[in-house]
Amino acid sequence: MKRIFPPFAYSDTRIDDCYWAEAVPETMLRRPALKGDLRADVVIIGAGFTGLGAALSLAEVGVQVRVLDLHYPGWGASGRNGGFCCLGGSKLSDAKLDRTFGKPARLEWRGAERAAIHHVDTLLRKHGIEADRHSNGETLLAHRPSLARFENDVVQIEENYGVTPEIIPATNLAAHGLNGGFHGGLSLPIGFALHPRKYLAGLLQAAETAGAVVHGDSPVFRITRQADGWRIETDQGAITCDKVILATNGYSSEDLPEWMAARYMPAQSSVIVTRPMSDAELAAQGWTSHQMAFDTRRLLHYFRLMPDNRFLFGMRGGLRASAASDDAIRRLIRRDFETMFPAWKHVETPHYWSGMVCLSPSLAPYCGEVPEMPGVYAGFAYHGNGVAMGSYTGARLADLVLERTDDAPIPAVMQRPPGRFGLGRFRRALMFAAYAGFRLRDRFA
């Protein structure tokens, strides 16, 4: 494998203290390695939301599916994210979408964002997955007074999603249980929060019940074309198949296949979770809502009170990957937590972990066939919104494999193959300048 971060970025050290593992430990997710030579209709590489979602859709109609994961299902972003099932997946503005794709395509994409959330809701209900669901939509909170005028956002949201959000003046935030020194809020009644590992474990069980076979500890090191299909090789076995789905997102490799090289950018995100807090502690800060929320920073913070009164607090950022840099990020996220919620300075945060989100040069996800590799499909680059969009993309990749067009269309925004970032394997250097600019704008703009 050729990856652009140092090995530490892909080590278990980064998830040793992941809160989600308390309810869904690694032992529940481990699956046997692939051994020997086998045949399948479809091989899926990556057992996260995208891979397992595709496996479930395919297995339900009788397709013989094998899923291969480097470690175990959910080891990557799907098992360590913040658990926000919300709108998103692209970083393109409405104006940029209209210029690049046209207004009808923009509205189609916004409809897919809503459909992605509905898709997860349907999976939870259909398969009886108990995932600690909570929050009525999401709330955007202004971190500066100049950003608290949300009138233009209301017009865009009404056009894009067909709902009218609620503007919350700063003076009313406390009454909504959202007191954290913000300058106003905008609440959308779309989306919900969940326990991502419980959701993933439910997807895994549903896919296996439908007939999919999932293998852990099966790193793929070669994909080759053969007369009878594709051959997928691991260190202990191989599978010959008709079609392949790549579902590795921010944990992708530059050479699996080589087309992936420089078409994705892993970016780090980190999370802390507090101990359970008492009602008195919540009241002292004035944050009593279980609404999932995020702020207006470009290097945003995302946070919510969970059903057991633990508080989850996450942030984007972190460009290096080492034990020392991880310690520095842990101190930084704790500092930001105390700054934004000063009444909780005494509250311990025993859980800290980090992982990779995935960006593309086009700032949009990709869902389609890999050029010049007939029968090989890829889905990636959800820009930090993989719970909903990753799940949705998995189902759409299954549609492509089945040549099924009557389920749900793949938006034009997702069909254009991404180009390549500059600097190749050294493209992380581009992020240093970008992040410096983001920090300045977050502070002064």
Image (tube, rainbow, N blue to C red):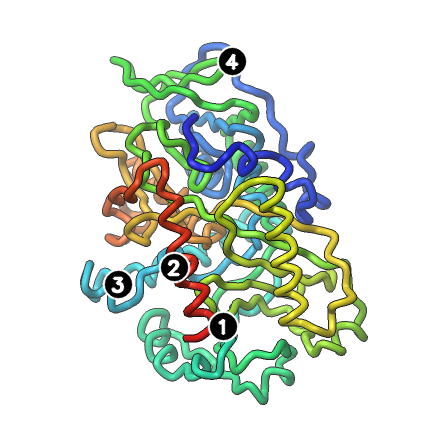
Numbered badge on residue 140: 1
- In this rendering, the answer to whether 330 lies above or below 262 is below
- Quarter of the image for the C terminus: give it: bottom left
Q: Of label 2 and label 4, which has the lower sequence position?
A: 2
Q: Amino acid at mark 3?
A: Arg
- In-front residue for pair 123/49: 49
- Position of residue 209 measured from the top left corner of the image (x, y, whole percent): 56, 33
- Spatial CA distance of label 4 from label 1 is 48 Å
- Is residue 5 among what the camera can see? yes
Residue in the picture at 76% in, 78% down: 284
- Position of residue 153 measured from the top left corner of the image (x, y, whole percent): 37, 77
Numbered badge on residue 236: 4
Residue 433: image quadrant is bottom left
Which label lies toward us, 3 or 1?
1
Q: Which residue is mark 2?
A: 113
Residue in the picture at 51% in, 79% down: 185
- In this rendering, the answer to whether 358 lies above or below 139 is above
Q: Amino acid at mark 1?
A: Leu
- Spatial CA distance of label 2 from label 3 is 11 Å
Disc 1 is placed on an element classified as: strand
- Position of residue 119 measured from the top left corner of the image (x, y, whole percent): 45, 53
Q: Of label 4 and label 1, which has the lower sequence position?
A: 1
- Position of residue 115 measured from the top left corner of the image (x, y, whole percent): 39, 58
Q: Which residue is mark 3?
A: 106
Disc 4 is placed on an element classified as: loop
Disc 2 is placed on an element classified as: helix
- Is residue 133 among what the camera can see? no
Q: Residue furthest bottom?
A: 171
Q: Of label 3 and label 1, which has the lower sequence position?
A: 3
Q: Residues within 10 Å of mark 4 (few under 14, many from 20)?
A: some
